[in-house]
Structures are given as C-alpha cells and as structure tokens.
Amino acid sequence: MLNTINPQNLVLSAAQWSALGPYIIVAVGILASMLLATVKFGETGSRMPLFLFSVAVLLAAGGWNAMNWVKEPVQVFNGMMVADYFSSFFNILLCGATALIFLGSYSYLEEGDLHYSEFYPIMLTATLGMMFLSCATELLMIFIALELMSLTVYVLVGMRRMNSFSNEASIKYFIMGGTAAAIYLYGSALVYGALNTTKLAAISAALGTDGANSLSNPLLIAGIVMIFVAFLFKIAAAPFHMYTPDVYEGAPANITSYMATALKAAVFAALVRVSVSVFGDQGVLLLGNLQGAAHALIWILALMTIVVGNFVALMQTNIKRLMAYSAIAHTGYLLIGILAGPTVGYSGIVFYLVAYVAMNIGAFVLLTLFPGKDDEGLTLEGLKGLGKRHPVVAAALSVFLLSLGGFPPTAGFVGKYYLFTGALAAGETWLVLIAVLTSGVSVYYYFRLVLLMYMEEGSELSPFRASNFAYAAIAICLILTVYYGILPSQLLHTVKKAAVF
Amino acid sequence: MQMIFGENILSWLVFSPLLLAAILFCLPKGQDELARWVALAGSLLVFGLSLSVFFAFDPANPAMQFAIQKEWLPLIGARYSLGIDGISLFLVLLTTFLVPIIVLAAWHAVEDRVKNYMAFMLALEGTILGAFLSLDLFLFYVFWEAMLIPMFFLIGIWGSKDRIYAAQKFLLYTFVGSVPMLIAIIYLVLQTKAQFGDYSASLSDVMNLKLAADGMMSPQGLIFLAFALAFAIKVPLFPLHTWLPDAHVQAPTGGSVILAGVLLKLGGYGLLRFAMPIASGVMPIVAPWMMGISAVAIVYGAFVAIAQDDIKKLVAYSSVSHMGYVVLGLFALNQIGITGSMYQMLNHGVSTGALFLLVGVLYERKHTRAIAAYSGLAKTIPLFSIIMIIVTFSSIALPGTNGFVGEFLILQGSFLASPLFTAIAGTGVIFGAVYMLWLCQRILFGVPDAQKSEGLTDINWREFYYLAPLVALVFIMGLYPKFFLDRMEPSLTQLTKRINQTELKPTAATGKAPLYAQHD
C-alpha cells in the first residue's frame, strides 16, 4: 500500500512534467513573490511590481494550461493527482478568477491601508491549493489541497487586523473550518479502514464490484458522509452555512468575493470528483440500496440551501451579508447538479461556475469601489442614487445583478437553464420547480438593489475609488457575462468535454 | 427596403430597435432634444421596415414567411429561428406603429433622463418584436423574460408616486408566473431528444411530439397549465390581473400605452401560438374552464371599472374586461372566435392605446387623473372631446368602429361553443358601455367649471399628429375589416385545425408539421 512513495514512481515522463507545469509555475511564483515582498520599491514601497508579478504568474499558469491542454488524462505521482480536461479547465478558471480579484483589489487595498506585501504570496498559495483540489484524485491529496487553501484564506479573512469584525470572522472561520477539516480527515480514515485504499479510482472500483458488501459496512457509510459534510461546509450549503454571513461580512470585500467564487469553484471541482467515484457514472445510483437515502439527503440539503439562502437574503441591509446569502442560494442550485449526476448534471455545474465566477467577481469588484475604509459604504443606503451619480458603474452592476437573478440575455440565465435541463433530464422536477420559484425571491432582492440605484435619490457620498485596474476587471467580467449569455455555444461544448471522467 | 435587407429582414426588425437603444444610451448627457429626434427617426425607420415586410407578405400563404433559421446552441437544441405569418404580422405592425406615437407623446411629458426613457422604450420594442417573431421556444423565452427589464425601468423610474411598488409587483408577478413555463419548455426539449433523437426547441419539432393527453395531470395538461399561467398573467386574466391596475396607474403614459397596446397581446398571442397547439390534446377539457373564467373576467372587469374615480384606473380595468373577450374567443376553439380574438387584440391596442394617450394629454395639463377634476371638456377643449368620443365608441364596440367587428366575431364564435358563457360575456358589452359613457358624461359634458378648466388647452399639433392615425385606424378597421382578416385567415385556418386535432400526427415524410413548413 505504500507504493505511493516508491522512488521509481517519482520519475516523471515528459507528459507528466508538462501536466505539472502550471503547478510548478505557481509554486515557484509563490517563492519568488515572497522574496519580492521583502524588497522596498520606491520611496513609499510601491506594491506595483509585486502586483504585476503575481498577475503574470497566474497568467503564465493559466496560459500554460491553455497551450498544453491535456486531451488524455495523465496520472501523476502514482495516481495522487491527474491532469485531465477537467483540471485544465478548472486551472484556467481559478487562475483567471484570482487574476481578476488581484486587478480588483489593488486600489481597494491601497486606500484601505491593507496593502500588505504578504497579500500576494498568500493569495497565490491559496490559489495553488485550489488548483490542487481540481486535480487531486486521492483523499489525502484532497485534504492537503483543502488545507493549503483554507489556512491561507483564514489569514486573508483576518487581514484587516485592527477591525474586530475581521478578527472575529477569521477566528470563527478558523475554528469551524478546522472542525470541518478534522471531520474530513476522520471520514477518510474510516474509508481507508473499510476499503484499504484512499484513491478515488480504487474506491470507485471497490464500490462498483463489491457494492452490496461494502455498503453493509457502517465504517464506509460514515466515512463517506463525513467527507461530504466537510465539502458541504466549504461550499456553504445549509445547514453548514452558519459561518458564511459573518465571515463574508467581516472579511475585506475582495476576500469575500474570492471565497464566494474561486474557493467555491475549487471545492466543487473536488466534490464532483469524489461524487463520481462514490456515486459512479449514473449519479447517485451506485450506492445500491442506499441510493434512496443518499438521494434524499442531498435533495433535502439542496432544497434547504436554496430556500435558506434566498429567503434570508431578503432581510439583509448590508450588501456583503446579502451577497453571502445569495452565494448560499447559488450553492443550492449547484447541488442540484450534483444530484443530477455525471452524465447530465456535472457539465451544468462547470458552466454555472464559470458564469457565477464572472458575474459575482464583477459585482464584487464594483462593490469594492464604494467609499468607506472598512466597507461601511456597502449598505443599501450607499447604493441610493448611484444611477445618477455614476451611470456607467450602475449599469454594469445592474447587468451583474440581472445575471445573478438569472435574466436573459446573460450568462446567469444560460447557466441556470443548462443546469436545470440536466436536473430535469435526471427527473428532479420538483426540486427544479422549487428552485426556479425561489429564484423569483432572488429576483426581488437583486432588483431591489437596482431599484435603489435608479429610483431613489441618494445623499451625495464621496466619489468612487476610481481605479483603472478595477475597471479593467469589471469590463472583463461584463464581457464574459454578456458574451456567454448570448453566444455560449462554444463554452457549452467545452464544459461538456470537461465533465467526462 | 426588402431589397436591401434581403432574407435577414426579420433580424433587422428585431435588432434595429435594440441597436438604436444602445446608441441612445451612449448619447452624451444633456442632449435631450437630440435623443428625442433620434428616437423618433429610429422608431419611424423600424415602422418602415415592418411596412416593407407587410408589403412583401404573401397574404395567401399560411406558412411562416421570411423565415430565418440558424444554429445557435446545438447542445440544448436552441436555434435562432424567426418567421412571420398572418397571426404575428399585425401584432408586429401594431408594435412598430405604436412606438413612434409613444415617442411623440413623451416629447414634453418626459423631461428627466430623456435618452434613457427613449432607449428603454426602443429596447422594449426590440424584445417584444423578438417574442412575436420567435419560432423557437428557447429564443421566445429569452425575449419574453428580457422584456421585463426595460418595462421595469420604465415604470420604476418615470412612473408616479407608487412607481417602485408597481414596478416590483409587475416584475415579480410576471417572473414567477413565467418560471413554470421555463420548466415546461425544458421538458419539451428533453422530450424531443427522447422521441426524435436530438434536442430541439423549435416550435415545429415540439408540436410534432407525441405526448399523452388524458386528463390535466398528463404531460399535455401540465404543459398547458404551465404555459397558460405565464400567458394568463400577461393577458391578464382574472384573477391574475392584480398587477395590471398598479402598473398602469403608476406607469408613464408611454409605458401604459405599450403595456396595454402590445405587452398584454403577448399573453393572447402566446396562448394561441404556443399553449393551445402544443397542448391541443387537452383543449376539450380546458376550453370550458377558460371560457368560464373569461366570462367572469369580462363582467368583473367592467364592474370594477364602473366604480373607479381615477381615469387611468378605469381604463386599466376596462383592459381586464376587454382582454377577457380575447381569451373567450380563443377558447371557443373555432375559427370565428379565434379570428375575433386576433382582431380584438388589435382593436384593444388601438383604442386602449388611444385612451391612455388621451389620459396623458389631460395629465400633462392638469397633473391629475381624478375624474372629478374634469367637467365640460366638450366646451373647453372640443377637439380633444371629439377624439375621446370616437375612441369611446371604439371601446364600447359601436358598429362602424373596429371594436364592433372584434366583439361580434368573438361572441358569434363563443356562442357556437357555449351559449351560456356567451350570454354572461354579452352583459359585459352593456356594462362596458356604462362605464365608458358615464366617464364621457362626467368629464366631457356638464357645465365647464372655471377652476377645473383653468390651464386646459386643446390638443396641439404634436398631439394631433399622434392621435390622428389611431382615430383613422378606428374607422379603417371598423369599416373595412376584410383587409386585415384576409391576411390573417390562411394562417388562422391552419392553426384552428391544428388546435382542434386531438390526435397528433406528424407528417410522415419530413417529420415537420405542415403548418410550419418553410416557405420558399
């Protein structure tokens, strides 16, 4: 069983080196950016070189993936990780999302006196963890990736050191996240005890050939449930979502968007891989006579997540909290995809994640432009009259909100349509019906923001943080949101290919 | 113009208003006069485009004309597919005809953010045209939902006091009402995959599906319910009409005109084009119910209208009543009734559009819509009063006006289907006369009051220009309906046959339903 560290398995072929390219680039980038962070540029210690370097690292890693797109899966390190279409796709998505967040953060951090040089290495480390999540095919590898990501994000959440909310959020997230990690680890130990393996492929094979027997083993069931609980915690599914509003509110806005988008996408990537191995090609079928139970559990969780997210969002006056609940609701939509299974559901998840990353980062970068050092401008009051004061900004935010609400012609609509098509093909009619009806609730709170911008007169707040980097990020997100709303055909084909295991 | 735009003329028709809207949004701030002229010229251009379609339209051909079909999202079966036939032809014309009128009506009524108002109006026009011309369910849904956005802004920004409440109510009502339709559409697309081997959202393929139709809980029954919910809210059919009075009363004049004139028609159009043919198997079950509800809607709308003391609210409830006739005629399921409904939709667009414009004229002068605030207008502003009387006659379906033709055909058709409901609906004609004539009596006649008539001036040239075409149409459509009916008839004959055919039989050779066979 210990052949994982058999030296001859560590000799890499050219294909494997190439598959590891993006990870090596980011890892080297982390080290280099740490060194770079110690250098003081100019009189005031400009962060510009560090910023440019970090963006370049991400672009290089994403670009490497785009150039050496892996057609045939390449196993690396004796099946600890795999480079395939799916991981290539996610690497580009994650690097792109992080780069967008870097662009959006620059002036936000400058003016919030938050521009610590550590920010860049830490963000890059978190991103590396996320990239590992999308390619890990072994339970412990997933754990390492999960922790690499989580530990760095705990730090990022508490970045506003002098702010008690930020500190509270960080501690809260750390304790809860630590518990989730422990549950995960315990779950994988139980799975190992039951099946004598931690590799996803081997788990899948064991369940497939010996389904009935393995399933009578309570160790295995408990282990799988625990692993899922940890994932559900990270993606903020109800009832494991309790930390989300506080953490999202306490964290600096750019970190909130990072958690809501890139982190969620990465954990979903891992969740999809684990689901494939546990539930098999047919979705929630492989569990044999437990099929009903597993299905019912995820069904109820998805339902709760959607309902809790959408209805509680109605009552929020702080925009970051509102977005936190809306993020919970979106997690619920994505869980429907998990329920629908690999053949029809998982490509919908991938598409929706792309749309979600574009529209959510766009909205958040816009929100980081708001005045107020500790995000105190991020209330419903602060939005009033924005349409008159900053028509272009308000129009862009409206597009993102429309997309989040699922209106055509935006990526959010196509994403929902595609996701729900898969779910209906899998026979989840009631869940989809409830999901689309409660998305009517979400339309109410998203449009309330639009309404405040255009239909209410606002006090003359101090002007926006004008930032060309942020505008560039917004423009990119806007283009993606609208483009994939009108001409998503190519992306649909790509995600279809990506979600083949 | 057909020569210039060639086979893509329908695409131009849909996208030129959207393009104009984008141009208007990009105009520099403060150029209100420029924005008005651009909007007027642009909307006239779009009207010209639609006229060129009209003149090139072959009246004898029942099939879709100028059809465009392009692959769009093969993975989910959506195609970019547009076409026009006798059913959509006049609704398209009505839309393009009303928009320049609205632009003129808003010339001085809208002073705040003029370019945005015009841009949203043109964007709304584009999405409405898209919905009328779509032959693909996915494409239709995209336009159907997209049109909520400009309408939301039109009500919410330029409306009266409670505009925000009205805008939200309108949006939520229509959005939530539409989502079951989305699920029905997805279901139909999945069925095309199961039955024909490939995803397709195109109407012709969907109509070829073989779906069980035994009872309301069968696929066809549920599909009908899902579609009918969305369309009944749009019509709006009693008891789903409660968003309409709010939206109408709060909306600016132009918003009310396009809402009553065209947006409501999408409900009737949707029922006729999508809900009824796709779920034709359950028509015998649902038709009596729908007729009964419509009969109630007609009488209810009329009664509530009688009780109003706000002119705009009165007209709004009269819409509920009049659109009730449309649904009544549709579910008579015979050609007379359906033809009448089509005609009534056009009538309602013309007459209610004109009524809202007239209310707007009064509101611009006195800033109140209370009936009690006006009296003796016939003496103080005679030209206005003449137009008001003509439009009233049209609205109460006096012979010689357009309203008569529509209501007569509907009642005739529905009598063949259900004498009882027709009798109930018939009383609505009387009550309709009551509230409209009583309104006229109160505001037009009587002794002019010095205080009430202060500041009232008769309609000016601009107002005359946009009201005159509507008045002319009242008579043209009333005296020479043949011109319009001839063009509708071939398509309606085919659709009526289709709706009455409970067994679905795709034509063997092509697998395409004959109705939507492409015209070459």
Image (cartoon, rainbow, N blue to C red):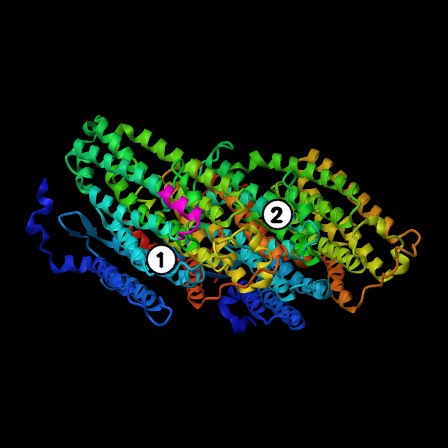
* Residue in front for this viewpoint, A250 or B261: A250
| B388 w.r.t. B341: above or below | below
Q: On what subunit does the disc labeled 1 rest?
A: A
Separation of marks 2 and 1 at Cα, in angstroms: 36 Å
Q: Main secondary structure of the magenta part?
A: helix
Is A25 on the left or on the right of A423, as rendered? Answer: left
Q: Nearer the viewer, mark 2 or mark 1?
A: 1
Residue A97's tag is 1
Name the residue at 33% across, 70% down: A41
Which x, y percent locates residue A202?
16, 40
* Residue in front for this viewpoint, A354 or B298: A354
* Residue in front for this viewpoint, B114 or A247: A247
Name the residue at 33% across, 61% down: A117
Q: Secondary structure at mark 1?
A: helix
Which x, y percent locates residue A475?
44, 64
Is A289 on the left or on the right of A257, as rendered? Answer: left
Q: On what subunit does the disc labeled 2 rest?
A: B
| A417 w.r.t. B303: above or below | below
Q: Is residue A162 magenta?
A: yes
Which amino acid lies under the numbered mark 1 shown in the image of this protein?
A: Ala
Give the residues drawn in magenta, as a range: A160-173
Is A304 on the left or on the right of A224, as rendered? Answer: right
* Residue in front for this viewpoint, A432 or B167: B167
Which x, y percent locates residue A200?
20, 41
Q: Residues within 10 Å of mark 1 (few under 14, many from 20)?
A: many
Name the residue at 54% across, 43% down: B176
Q: Is residue A127 magenta?
A: no
Residue A417's tag is none
Q: Which residue is mark 2?
A: B170
